[in-house]
Image: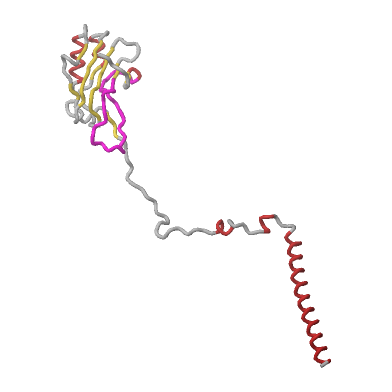
Amino acid sequence: MNLNYAQQKKSSYLQWFIGGGVTLAIISVLVIRTLMMQGLPYDEMFLSSYALVDSLEIPPRPGIAGIIITGPKIEPVYFKIDVQRAGLRKLDWDEIVAWDRTADVKIRATITDDGSLVFDEVTDVYCPGHTSAGRIIASVVKTWAYTPYKTGTIRFWFNVASTGQKLTIDVRGLKRKPGIPGKIDVFNGLLYYIDGLSRRDVNSNGIVRF
């Protein structure tokens, strides 16, 4: 009986010794780890919750790599004198000056759907005291035609004696032609067909009052 008691006591001491050794080993590992991490920056001591997300590379969707979506380039169109139109006549400015150096002529015209320019030579031509010059200018202007991108009213003022703009064109009455897609820009181009007149003497965006 005394022998059994002695063996049990010896076994108990051995268990305590083993348990204490394991505990001491764990504590030693924790202490050593703490000492090693003291010299590291904070963000290297702990793994950020975002670190994993930031490091993940999202693969491209299948079938779209290298695809470039393009379409036809949309070019603008220009509302201007249509030089391809048959019967078009060019006004000779030097001839007008030689005929009447003080000519002052205003013309109010309508541009139709096909780009034709129409007006009445009696009611739409204003040239008091300069009837001959008015008749010459009107006969030429009546042949002018435009590219069919705008319709409405256009006014011209031929002021031969002016030291500034000798020709003023009023386009406020013109509107974009219905049916032209909104994605297409319509710009104004050359609105007159005249020889001998410098562009600096022309105001293509002025106001002409009758």
Vertical position of residue 185 compared to residue 162: above or below? below
Tell me the quarter of the image containing the C terminus.
Answer: top left
Q: 12 left or right of 56?
A: right
Magenta span: helix, strand or loop, mainly?
loop
Q: Any magenta on residue 187?
A: yes
Q: How far from the left and from the top, in percent, is residue 12?
A: 79, 82
Vertical position of residue 32 compared to residue 121: above or below? below
Q: Residue at x 29, y 26 (%)?
A: 190
Q: Name, please, the residue furthest toward the front.
A: 1
- Front residue of this view, candidates 173 and 49: 49
Tell me the quarter of the image containing the N terminus.
Answer: bottom right
- Front residue of this view, candidates 149 and 193: 149
Vertical position of residue 58 compared to residue 176: above or below? below
Q: Residue at x 28, y 16 (%)?
A: 208
- Front residue of this view, candidates 32 and 183: 32
Q: 80 left or right of 37?
A: left
Q: How far from the left and from the top, in percent, is residue 127?
A: 22, 10
Q: How far from the left and from the top, in percent, is residue 2?
A: 84, 92
